[in-house]
Image (spheres, rainbow, N blue to C red):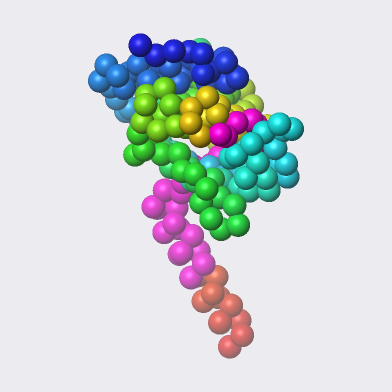
Amino acid sequence: MLSATPLKRLSPATATAVVGFAMLAATGTDPAQAVNLKTFNISGDFAPAALDGSVGLPVNLANAFFNGTYTVDVDQLPASSSFVDLKSWTVNLVKNNTVLRTLSNSLAGNTAYIQENILAFSDAGLLTKQNNNLYSLELDFDSNFTGTGSSNDGKLLDNSDLGSVKSSGLTAVTFVKSEPVPEPQTFAGIVVVTTIGLSLKRKQKA
C-alpha cells in the first residue's frame, strides 16, 4: 500500500497526480488513449541559487537549464479540472553541458501531466520502489494552457531525502517556454523560402 507521507512537501496537485499515476502503474491500468497527439518543445532556466536549506539536486541545478519534448492529446486541453496525462516525454536537466537528470516516460517511476495551467514532470521512484527519487519539475503557465506559452514561474521540488539519497529542497524556474514542434511541411516551406531568397540575392548581385 502506498504511503502519502513522503509527499508532504510537494504541492497538492503534484501529490495527487503522483499517487494516482503510481496506482495506475500498480494495477496495470492504462490511461485513456490519445486521439489528437501533438508534440511540443519545452525549455527553460533555473535560478542562480536554490532555496536555503536545500541539498543535492536542487543545489546542483543553480544556473542550469532544461530542455526536451512532450506529446499530449490536445483535444483534452485545456485541462480545467482533471489531470491530462502526457503520452510521451523526455526532459533533460543540464548543467555545464552535462545531463544531471532525465525525466522520461521510458524510465520507471516517471509520470507527467497537465492540470489547469500546470505542466509537471515527476520521478516518483521512491513510491513505486523503482529508485530513491521523489522530485517534480512543475511549470506554471497562464490559464487555459493548451501547450503553447511562456512563463517566469516554476520550480523543481525534491523530497528524495526521505529515501536513502540525501537530496531535498527547491530550485526556482526563472523562465520556461513551450511551443509546438514544427510540422514537416513547415520545415519544407522554410527550405523553399530560404532557397528562393538566396536565388534572388544571387540574381541581384549578378
Residue 171 drawn in magenta: yes
Quick check: 167 left or right of 87?
A: right
Q: Position of residue 52 (x, y in %)?
A: 74, 32
Quick check: 61 left or right of 75?
A: right
Extreme residue in the left direction: 28
Task: Check the picture and name the quadrant holding the N terminus.
Answer: top left
Extreme residue in the front direction: 164
Q: Is residue 162 above or below residue 4?
A: below
Inspect this view and state whether residue 70 appears.
Answer: yes
Residue drawn 44% across and 13% down?
3
Residue 117, located in which quarter of the rendered image? top right
Residue drawn 41% across and 39% down?
104
Residue 47, located in which quarter of the rendered image? top right
Q: Is residue 149 above or below residue 145?
A: below
Residue 93, located in which quarter of the rendered image? top right
Q: Position of residue 167 (x, y in %)?
A: 57, 34
Task: Check the picture and name the quadrant holding the C terminus.
Answer: bottom right
What's drawn in magenta, residue-wise?
166-195
Q: Position of residue 157 (x, y in %)?
A: 59, 29
Inspect this view and state whether residue 176 appears.
Answer: no
Residue drawn 36% across and 38% down?
107
Q: Between 198 and 80, which is closer to the camera in this rendering?
A: 80
Q: Position of residue 195 (x, y in %)?
A: 48, 70
Residue drawn 40% across and 53% down?
185
